[in-house]
Image (tube, coloured by chain):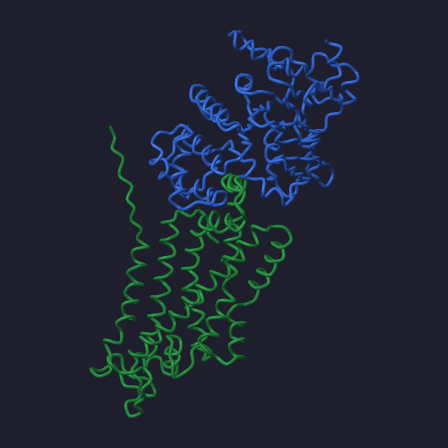
Amino acid sequence: MILLAVKNLAVQIPQQDKTIHLLKDISFTLKRGETLAIIGESGCGKSTLCLSILGLLPQHFQTAGNLTFYKNGVEIQLQDQTDPHFNNIRGSIVSMVFQDTLGSFNPLFRCGQQIIDVLKEHVSGSPIQNKQRAIQLIQQVGLNDAEDVFNKYPHQLSGGMSQRVALALALASNPDLLIADEPASSLDSMAKNQYLDMLRELKDKTNLALILVLHDLNDALRFSDSMFVMYNGRGFEYRKKSDIQKTPAHPYTRALIDIQNSLNQTRLPQQIPGEVPSITKLIPGCPFHPRCSKRSDICRTTFPPPTFFLNNHFVCCHHYFKSN
Amino acid sequence: MKILPQKTQTNQSMTSGCITIGLVFIFLLLGPLLTPINHTSQNLSASLQPPSSSHWMGTDYYGRDVLARLVFGGRITWIIAIASTFMAVNIGTIIGLFSAYQGGWIDLIVMRLVDVMLAFPKLFVVLLIVGLGASSTSLLIWVLALFSWMEIARIVRSEVMSQKNRTYIKSVRALGLRTPRIVFIHILPNVLGPVIVSSVLLISTIILVESSLSFLGLGVQAPSASWGSILNDGRIDPLGTWWLSVPAGLLILTTVIGFNLIGNGLHKQLDLKKIV
């Protein structure tokens, strides 16, 4: 059952002399219980994409395209960031764990109080029920001394704890979709795996859909059902994880997988030649062409139209058919 | 191993400010116990008496007990200052919050209004309004409040501006909290520190303005008293009738210094890096 359909989403910042395109033509669909990993280098627009799904982009950003949420057979279409329907969607259908988890708490209130605050907005219950629910949520994210954590101020939490409490906070409104922006980037690899495992368990239990923004391809390959590879504000490849793992269709994805494989085999990592282009610079044609090993003349002038597979999955490369 | 000296947490300006204000407060509270005489009862035969056993602080032109008038006038001065500060802080906080959270052209208009209000010489405008209207204590409180909220609004606005882009505000928005809840429950407590400091400092400013007005005869009207009007009673012969001007002047001075010390102390205590 489809939960969210993003169609041709574009985000731009109009400036006096030019327009900066942060996102161009982003399309994907997400089913209930599905985990989508968004992969890409820093500055490729992953966080912008997350914020635009929540309608939290700054006021001067312009958006185009469609977001459609499906809940209980009702279709909720959102046209732009100021759409009042976002008020009914935030929290109740989608919520988000931010990258800076410690900063996402109000420094003045105890953690438990902040969870209760969200419960008050979304779940009607007596104060005692709310407190029980908050403690239950803290236990649910794998913290044993929940009562103790409930009474702690945000600055008293350790990095790992704040990550988990932030998750409890995001789950308090009982959303159908959770967006996690680099959910475990500040944790060491052991803690990160524990955290992601817990997230997967939670997801399986509650049929929650997840959008994970990840830096680490390994994590994406381990924890996701499908992957969305982004580069310079565009979607390059959107396919099932297993397909990407076996036969990456885009040269960029292939390069990323090769790097990952070389790391896994403890060889010296290969690197993609060239630099990540700045999002403010307009690159004609395919933005990856200066770094691509398969580039040809057409790559310099025209952005490749998507080649579609099943389930709206696609790849954007002029050379996809040639290489197969 | 070197033992680091423990950081001492004494806040001298806070302590001395609290002691000063505490003493003045006790004087105002327990003053009537010192003198049973009503502050308005006249005795023309005992006009301008220097301090004596029956009138500890002497009498004024109409033979009214100066001690009783200092106590009563001080209460009036304090009530006016605190009430109008309270109102100014409320007005300023609400306008600042609203303006900053809305942003855009609303913010632009509100802040230009603040600029215009700040450009008026406060004392002159207050003088004009109080002079035109029938002077009463409640009018004085209103007028003082209406010309004092701008600094508070500016401080609140700048604080809200910096708070509203913090991750925790994005986070509560992402969790679906409504705007009034975000503004009043999450942002407001985070901007209160500077507001408290500047409101304490505002009390002393308003005491000075009120005293100036009463000194000029436009504030609290006779037979009621305020420190400013008592100061005015001793204006004709300040050296000869020193018991009129000196104690009232000293009380104004100590109160203003006391509140300023508390303001500075709070500033330090709340660890505010910036204050307008």
Q: In this view, does B106 lie to the left or right of B93?
A: right
Q: Kindly identify the residue that appears in the image at 62 percent across and 10 percent down.
A: A246
Q: The blue chain is which one?
A: A
Q: In this view, does B244 lie to the left or right of A63?
A: left
| Image position, residue B263 (x, y; %) | 38, 57
- Quarter location, residue A20: top right
Q: In this view, does A157 lie to the left or right of B3?
A: right
| Camera-nearest residue between B47 and A224 | A224
Q: A78 above or below A197?
A: below
| Image position, residue A162 (x, y; %) | 42, 32
| Camera-nearest residue between A107 and A5 | A5
Pick out the residue farthest to the front: A73
The N terminus of chain A lies in quadrant: top right
Q: Is residue B189 left or right of residue B57?
A: right
Q: A58 above or below A315?
A: below
| Camera-nearest residue between A59 and A238 | A238
Q: Kindly identify the residue that appears in the image at 56 percent across and 51 percent down.
A: B100
Q: Colour of chain B?
A: green
